[in-house]
Amino acid sequence: MLRKEKDRLLLILVFSLAGGIFKIAGGIIYHSKSVLVDALTSMANLASLVLILAFMKKSSMPPDENHHFGHVRLKFGGSIFTLMAYSFVAGIALMEVLSPKAYTVSLGAPVMAALGLICYLVAISLSKESRGGPLGYYATFTVSEVIEGITVIASSLTGAVYSYIFDYLGSIALTFYIFYELLKSFKDLTLKVSDIAPPLRIVEGIKKSFESRGLSVEELKMRYIDEKTLEGHMIIIMDKNNMEDFEEALSEAKREAKEKYNAEIFVEFDRKKDNVK
Ligand SMILES: [Zn+2]
């Protein structure tokens, strides 16, 4: 990582942390349950930023004794531990919501929530500048923090001015939202590690790369290794009469699959069957 990139990352961490601290203050010192639940998600969000970056770094390690195919899939470790962090705070939020005793919200709560939101907006705009990288991913991730931030400013403000009930309702809504997001993310992750095949268009495109070079593809099985990396297992009927052209066509087609679709194709050969054709 570049020096500038590292400084930016540090700034993002500092602003995210500051945002979380303002929210914790709003929740605990100024007695707002909705701001407290929001503070919990901010902490989980911060933990996920660190986790995602750590696993990203691990996933770029070259193959070794224990990981013959490289470490690409270690990337999912970041997502898995992020889900653990959010599940943990979801449990704490649920405990808060399940004790409906009357309380009084101070006006400091919406003020703290607003300060927290400002910190998050800075962090997001900083991470958006590094487009495409892992931080760009973090930026989209954190947009939900902004929605939550606006929600709890409204609920804690009405909670302080009118009745704690508004604040309490805000905390319930946010807790439901965490569980909803968790469910969505668990489903998404399960699908991603399930050896899911790419769209038919890609499978056909790769077949064409081989067939247009005179190779007869008997079978092609494909799966995603991570969000962007594909792996394919192919059976080709070998033509023994023209080995040189055959080998050249094969390596060209493989290169095209790699460049066009980021797909690594493993080829197995089958002998031409005499009874066919
Ligand atoms: Zn390893």
Image (cartoon, rainbow, N blue to C red):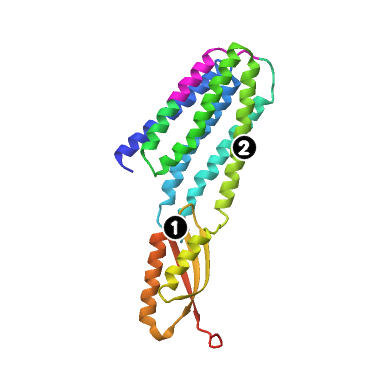
Which residue has dot 2 on it?
Answer: 180
What residue lies at 59% left-to-right and 34% top-to-bottom?
178
1 or 2: tag closer to the N-terminus = 1
What residue lies at 54% left-to-right and 31% top-to-bottom?
41
Q: Quadrant of residue 209?
A: bottom left
Report the label total. 2
The x, y position of residue 37, in whole percent, is 58, 26
- Does the segment drawn in magenta span residue 105? yes
Quadrant for the N terminus, please.
top left
Tag of residue 276: none
The x, y position of residue 180, in whole percent, is 62, 37
User: Considering only vertical position in the picture, is 73 above or below 125?
Assistant: below
- Does the segment drawn in magenta span residue 28? no
Q: Quadrant of residue 242?
A: bottom left
Task: Tell me if I can see residue 20 in this picture.
Answer: yes
Which residue has dot 1 on it?
Answer: 70
* Depth order, front residue of 68/168: 168
* Depth order, front residue of 11/252: 252
Q: Secondary structure at mark 2?
A: helix
Task: Tell me if I can see residue 92 in this picture.
Answer: no
The amino acid marked with disc number 2 is Tyr
Residue extent of the magenta highlight: 103-118
Q: CA distance from mark 1 to mark 2?
A: 34 Å
User: Considering only vertical position in the picture, is 222 above or below 155?
Assistant: below
The amino acid marked with disc number 1 is Gly
- From the viewer's perspective, is the residue at label 1 or at label 2 nearer? 2
Q: Residues within 10 Å of mark 1 (few under 14, many from 20)?
A: some
What residue lies at 59% left-to-right and 16% top-to-bottom?
158
**Magenta: predominant secondary structure element?**
helix
The x, y position of residue 204, in whole percent, is 49, 65
Q: Residue furthest bottom?
A: 274
